[in-house]
C-alpha cells in the first residue's frame, strides 16, 4: 500500500526557509494523482498548504501562496515543500498526503517543525 | 473561499451512545466534495467518509455521513472506546483546486 514519510529539520530560525521532503513508497508518483502538504499548529486545527500533480501543476493556499513552493522529483519518487520568511506562527506539525476522493489519504506520520531563534 | 463551521466544539458522550456531529458550509457545496476525518492524539488524521456519505476502506459501518447543500452530518451509531477523538470535515473546491477544513469537534468520554 502507499506510504509517505516526511523528513526535514525540526528547528528553523525566524526569517529562514523551511525545506521538507516527502518520500513515497508503494506507488510511483509518475503514475498520477495529486499530492499535498497540510500543517497543524500545536493544539490547533488543520490547514492546507498546497498540492502538486505528478506533472508539476501546483495549487497553493492563497494565504500562504507568496511564501510557498512545492515541487516533485519523480526520479526519487518524492515531493518537497519550501516555506520562506518563517515566523513562530509557522510552528506546526507538517504532514504530506496523497489526494484521493477529494480528500487526503493516506497521510505521512507528520514532522514537527519549530520556528525559534 | 468556503468556510466550514463545525458544531459542537466538544461533545461529551458515553460508550454505546449515538454521536451526531455537524459541519455547515458558508455556501452551497457539492456533496461529492465533502470529506470527514478522525484524528487521535499524536496521530495523523484518517479519512473516514468521502463524497459526504461513502465510507473509506476499512471504516466500520457504525460511521455514516449524510447531508447536502450547506449542512452535513457525521453520525456514529454506537460509540466504541476507540471512537473518542477529534473529527474534522473538509471541503474540496475544484476551480482552482483548494481545500478547507472545519475547526474540528472533540468527542470526549463523559
Image (tube, coloured by chain):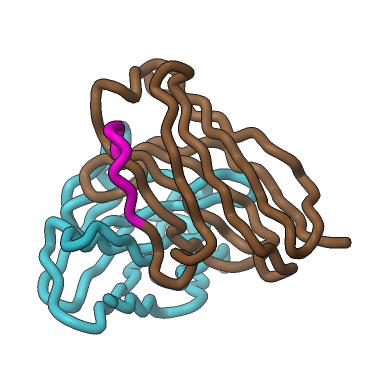
Chain colours: A brown, B cyan
- Residue B34 makes an appearance in the image: no
* Of the pair A84 and B38, the residue shown nearer to us: A84
Picture layout, residue B14 above or below residue B69: above
In-image side of B24 versus A2 (left or right): left
At a point 48% along the width and 63% down the height, the residue shown is A47
Please say whether residue A56 is one of the residues in the magenta stretch. Answer: yes
Q: x%, y% of residue A8?
A: 68, 37
Residue A11 x, y percent position in the rendering: 80, 49
Check the image and report above or below for A18 versus A72.
below
Q: Relative to A61, does residue A76 appear above or below in the rendering?
A: above
Residue nearest the viewer, comparing A114 with A106: A114
- Which residue extends farthest bottom? B26
Q: Position of residue A107 (x, y in %)?
A: 46, 39
Residue A76, visible in the rendered structure:
yes
In percent of width and height, residue A81 lies at: 53, 45
Question: Which residue is located at x 34 percent, y 24 percent?
Answer: A29
Q: Is residue A55 left or right of residue B9?
A: left
Image quarter where the N terminus of chain B lies is bottom left
Instruction: Name the one closer to the observer, A92 or A20.
Output: A20
Along the horizontal axis of the image, is A101 left or right of A93?
A: left
Vertical comparison of B20 with B35: above or below: below
Q: Quadrant of the C terminus of chain B?
A: bottom right
A64 to the left or right of B25: right
**Residue at the right extreme?**
A117
Kindly identify the residue that appears in the image at 30 percent across and 32 percent down: A54
Query: To which quarter of the image does residue B34 belong?
Result: bottom left
Q: Which residues are magenta?
A: A53-59
Tell me the residue at 63%/52% (across/down).
A93
Q: Is residue A61 magenta?
A: no
Amino acid at each position: 500500500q502507499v506510504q509517505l514519510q516526511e523528513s526535514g529539520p525540526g528547528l528553523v530560525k525566524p526569517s529562514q526557509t523551511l525545506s521538507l521532503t516527502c518520500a513515497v513508497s508503494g506507488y510511483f508518483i509518475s503514475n498520477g494523482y495529486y499530492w499535498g502538504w497540510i500543517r497543524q499548529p500545536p493544539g490547533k486545527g488543520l490547514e492546507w498548504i498546497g498540492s502538486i500533480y505528478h506533472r508539476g501543476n501546483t495549487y497553493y493556499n492563497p494565504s500562504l501562496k507568496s511564501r510557498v513552493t512545492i515541487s516533485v522529483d519523480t526520479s526519487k519518487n518524492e515531493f518537497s515543500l519550501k516555506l520562506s520568511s518563517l515566523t513562530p506562527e509557522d510552528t506546526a506539525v507538517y504532514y504530506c498526503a496523497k489526494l484521493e476522493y477529494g480528500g487526503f489519504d493516506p497521510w505521512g506520520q507528520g514532522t514537527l517543525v519549530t520556528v525559534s531563534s | 473561499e468556503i468556510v466550514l463551521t463545525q458544531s459542537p466544539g466538544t461533545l461529551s458522550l458515553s460508550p454505546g451512545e449515538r454521536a451526531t456531529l455537524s459541519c455547515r458550509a458558508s455556501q452551497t457545496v457539492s456533496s461529492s466534495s465533502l470529506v470527514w476525518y478522525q484524528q487521535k492524539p499524536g496521530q495523523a488524521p484518517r479519512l473516514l467518509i468521502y463524497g459526504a456519505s461513502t465510507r473509506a476502506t476499512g471504516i466500520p459501518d457504525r460511521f455514516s455521513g449524510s447531508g447536502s447543500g450547506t449542512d452535513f452530518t457525521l453520525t456514529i451509531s454506537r460509540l466504541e472506546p476507540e471512537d473518542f477523538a477529534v473529527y474534522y470535515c473538509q471541503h474540496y473546491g475544484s476551480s482552482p483546486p483548494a481545500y478547507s477544513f472545519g475547526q474540528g469537534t472533540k468527542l470526549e468520554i463523559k
